[in-house]
């Protein structure tokens, strides 16, 4: 294909046959249609309905257990094991046990169901505490039984 110069006879013929106003009218009509399509697309995408859910629970998922709140004991000034003791000082009889199954830190107070069976092994990170406040402050939770 051979390119013709700007002032070629073919170009002059096209300019004579299609006046400039007609070219503008045709072009404005195209832009008007494009504008309508864009506006419709915007209205359809910004509808007031919420989007469909992206996650639906399956029958195998279980709801997480609701945490039980226990009031934290007030701190005492006579804390002898602020970060837990390896050997129990006199009067410090709260056992801080780490569960083998879950790795959860659980403390037991005298009189609870598993207090007597619980054995404290410091080599596994288990500790003795003097107050419940010390155990809670170090990330332990009270045994449920």
Image (cartoon, rainbow, N blue to C red):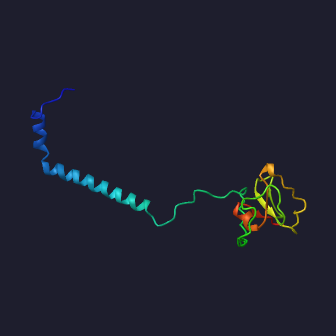
Q: Quadrant of the C terminus?
A: bottom right
Of the pair 112 and 76, the residue shown nearer to us: 76
Q: Is residue 31 left or right of residue 65?
A: left
Q: Position of residue 9 (x, y in %)?
A: 9, 33
Quarter location, residue 115: bottom right
Q: Position of residue 125 (x, y in %)?
A: 77, 52
Residue that appears at 27% across and 56% down:
32
How many numbered tags mark residues here? 0
Quarter location, residue 127: bottom right
Q: Is residue 86 left or right of residue 35?
A: right
Q: Is residue 15 left or right of residue 82?
A: left
Q: Is residue 21 left or right of residue 44?
A: left
Q: Position of residue 23 (x, y in %)?
A: 17, 48
Of the pair 118 and 65, the residue shown nearer to us: 118
Q: Position of residue 103 (x, y in %)?
A: 76, 53
Hey, which residue is sitting farthest top in the picture?
A: 2
Residue that appears at 46% across and 67% down:
48
Residue that appears at 39% across and 59% down:
42
Q: Quadrant of the N terminus?
A: top left
């Amino acid at each position: 294909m051979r390119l013709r110069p700007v002032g070629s006879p073919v170009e002059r013929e096209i300019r004579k046959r299609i006046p400039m106003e007609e070219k503008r009218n045709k072009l404005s009509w195209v832009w008007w249609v494009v504008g309508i399509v864009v506006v419709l697309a915007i209205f359809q995408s910004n509808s007031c309905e919420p989007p469909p859910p992206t996650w639906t629970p399956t029958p195998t998922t279980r709801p997480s257990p609701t945490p039980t709140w226990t009031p934290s004991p007030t701190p005492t000034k006579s804390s002898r094991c602020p970060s837990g003791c390896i050997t129990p000082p006199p009067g410090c009889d709260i056992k801080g046990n780490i569960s083998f199954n879950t790795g959860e830190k659980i403390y037991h107070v005298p009189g609870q169901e598993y207090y007597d069976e619980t054995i404290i092994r410091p080599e596994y990170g288990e500790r003795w505490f003097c107050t419940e406040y010390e155990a809670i402050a170090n990330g332990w939770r009270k045994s449920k039984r």
